[in-house]
Amino acid sequence: MSDEQEKVILEEEGLLASLSSHNLDAFRDIFLEQHPYDQAKFFTKLEEEARFTVYSYLSPEEMAAIFENIEVEEDQYETYLSEMDPTFAAQMLSHMYADDAVDVLNELNKDQVASYLTIMDDDAAEEIRELLHYEEYTAGSIMTTEYIAIHANQTIHSAMQILKNEAPNAETIYYIYVIDEDKKLVGVISLRDLIINEPDLMISEVMNERVYSVSVGEDQEEVARKMKDYNFLALPVIDFKGHLLGIITVDDIVDVIDEEASDDYSKLAGVSDVDSNDRGPFSAAKKRLPWLIILLFLGMFTASLIGRFEATLDKVAILAVFIPLIAGMAGNTGTQALAVVVRRIAVGDPKEHSSLKMLMKEAGTGLITGTICGIVVTLIIFVWKGNFILGLLVGISILATLTVATIAGAFIPLVMHRLKVDPAVASGPFITTINDIISILIYFGMATLFMQYLI
Amino acid sequence: MSDEQEKVILEEEGLLASLSSHNLDAFRDIFLEQHPYDQAKFFTKLEEEARFTVYSYLSPEEMAAIFENIEVEEDQYETYLSEMDPTFAAQMLSHMYADDAVDVLNELNKDQVASYLTIMDDDAAEEIRELLHYEEYTAGSIMTTEYIAIHANQTIHSAMQILKNEAPNAETIYYIYVIDEDKKLVGVISLRDLIINEPDLMISEVMNERVYSVSVGEDQEEVARKMKDYNFLALPVIDFKGHLLGIITVDDIVDVIDEEASDDYSKLAGVSDVDSNDRGPFSAAKKRLPWLIILLFLGMFTASLIGRFEATLDKVAILAVFIPLIAGMAGNTGTQALAVVVRRIAVGDPKEHSSLKMLMKEAGTGLITGTICGIVVTLIIFVWKGNFILGLLVGISILATLTVATIAGAFIPLVMHRLKVDPAVASGPFITTINDIISILIYFGMATLFMQYLI
């Protein structure tokens, strides 16, 4: 932990004291020195009463900085805003970066949004309205309109002047975008280049005409990948005609990468969301039960399948001994294949590997792992039970199961991807249970064939 | 796909043509226009012969840009370097940002590293040697030494001069760090502030004395979290005495977040690595078999457990019907708990939730989900089989299993974390198989108790 963090922890007591003793100056002196993230963290820890004091101690602009850095459960935002005087809240929203303001407003109902927008000054309201249109998880939904744009036919010196004026409000000043008279994006220049080059050079001479941009409807995962690959600090967002609409900054992308990753992770584990989990066991149970109930019924189906083989089991009870082994192996290999395919769909750009190729590869993998595990299991059982037929039965079942289960693990997410469903939805538990069923059918199918040799 | 990307694809043919026709100028004209990431992507697609031509067409400095953006399997680096003339390779490494050069050198054996460092010019070699000392996954291992540092007792104007001179080599110029005479970090100022403020102001008047920094030994995940929370573009790295050693830039952090996430993901699925997976089914099988074999033996153990209950099964074959259901449910709930705990250890800072608290919470969650699923299953079986005792047996088993399995799913990663083992190693399949065993013991234990009522 760095000195800064220790300092922040020490200051917390001071802040709490100044709040309870209603010492405005003392509070502002300490609080406004802190980084907005620390301010936000402190604010979210406060009781309702203390929060009211804070609203009265800070300006809408100062409050905006906090809200740009706040991390709470969605429904919290509504609570906070409802506590504020509507005009104060509206002003705060208008002082926030448009993209952050939109994130907050997206958690409110339409009426609330409308009312805040009407109180707000028109320019801010306009900017926000535009952004509200864009669909969630698209470039448009995470872009901001506070960028700096200049024209090619001006000098670096004049560009620097514009920069100095707009710097306080722009979300980033490190890339300046060059547009033509009808707002089409024609180039980009980094602040680095502005500084290195002679002030009297024309922008057109130093700007980079190869501008990487994303279209406004592009998936945020795509944007994140591009930003990561090219190490950009910001990416311009354009419409289908090439007009500059806004920019996406790397800090938002860091959040996207983090969310998407933990989202895939949660789904693989069959939990709706593993992160926002600071509440009690009941809310946790509520989040996990849907999955468990679905899987319970799938499990009952598996049970009913085995039920059909009760006669077989009556004759050869030992068969039951290997059910978990075979079902388990099927589940594991299926999950492996699932993870690989989901991940590759997520990271690689789709062209690079045709679905069929992936499927064939997984089939091959399943066949290889199946053969090896099958042989191993046959030998173990032969040695352990001295029953070669039984060993062979289980071995062949393992071979067949692993092959099919691996293919299933790859096939299901691929189909979902084709159907434009997020493949990660085919979570581990789901695949596992599907493969339980497959494995039971194969195992008892084989058993029925082998029956005469087993008794 | 943006116009830029289409353009790059079109240019590829031109580049290949110019290589095969040995047209140096044509190649350089197109190639040097491209973004280093596109250059790297093109380079890694080339055959050995074509790569040799590229080495002869580009300067070490131009080659360095490619290597800073290359993404290949570790062992590829050695191949590339061995293809180059040693002096050329050494010069290339010295032109790379120190942190990237270190990443490459870390893939070579000690002798190779030593020989390159000796050919290299001393300053570069020195910088790299320092960085090579730091342990993997620490702040030191991902930091770079190409930062800009100034003193507090100079004017903004003179600082800007320094900036202009160092800009070409610095990895970022957007934060300038302020140090005292013995190199202690005392402040930071953003380029934004330098530009907004009057040139004749002193740095000491405008710099921010609250500098967030990370210590050189800090875990890279910690660094990533801090950078993400505070939306920094760079973080200074200091030693225990507060001396400025280097900086970590956000582009490296984006990679860290991505790696750590897909690493946890792979482990949850029980695959050594889901990403570097562009090879054939054999290498894929090789990666997955270790897990499958371990699980196979654990599965055999489960089987032998059930074997002990063969007598019970002989009497009441129907018991077998519910084995996969119970084992499956245990596996699923265990994986859920595992994912939640692993993720919370990864994202939350450890103080915030004591292990015991987490454990208690998971126990509660397991009890709730267990009770509900237990009741549901009892009813279903009662309706389906008209056998209440059997329903009760399975229901109680589910209740007990889910509770224990959930606790196990949370307990195992927590213990690993305490033992300083990466908790993510307790992968889904592992927990699942452990819970298979637990569930079998509970289920057949119960069955033996209920025996008299079942027959």
Image: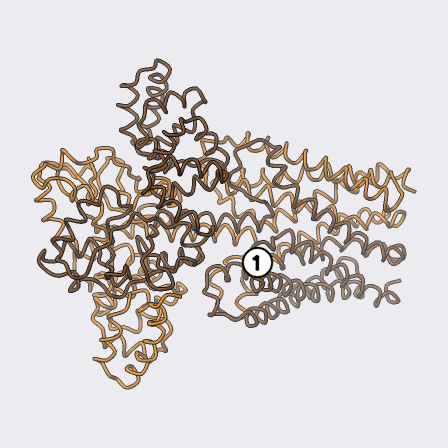
Chain colours: A brown, B orange
Instruction: Determine whether B314 is above or below A66 in the image.
Output: below
Which residue occupies the extreme top position in the image?
A: A21
In which quadrant is the C terminus of chain A drawn?
Answer: bottom right
Residue found at x 20% / y 40%: B189
Q: Position of residue A129 (x, y in %)?
A: 40, 46
Q: In this picture, is A6 found above or below B5?
A: above
Count the marks: how many?
Answer: 1
The residue at the far bottom in this view is B21
**Along the viewing direction, whichever of B254 and B107 lies nearer the viewer:** B254
Q: Is residue A117 above or below residue B86?
A: above
Residue marked by disc 1: A421
Identify the subunit bearing mark 1. Answer: A
Could you tell me residue B139's position as x and y percent?
A: 33, 45
When the figure is inspected, residue B424 is found, relative to residue B449, above or below; the finding is below
Drawn side of residue A225 relative to residue B402, left or right: left
- At horizontal 80% and vertical 63% (from top left) the residue drawn is A390
Q: In this image, B54 relative to B6: left or right?
A: left
* Front in this rendered view, residue B92 or B256: B256
Give A257 or A96, whichever is nearer the viewer: A96
**What secondary structure is found at the residue carrying circle 1?**
loop
Which residue lies most toward the right here?
Answer: B455
Residue B1 in the image: state x and y as whole percent: 40, 66
Label 1 packing within 10 angstroms: few (<14), some (14-19), many (20+): few
Which corner quadrant holds the N terminus of chain A?
A: top left
Q: Amino acid at mark 1?
A: Val
Q: Quadrant of residue A86?
A: top left
Q: Give A416 or A239, whichever is nearer the viewer.
A: A239
Q: Quadrant of residue A94?
A: top left
The location of residue A92, given as percent across then percent down, is 35, 33
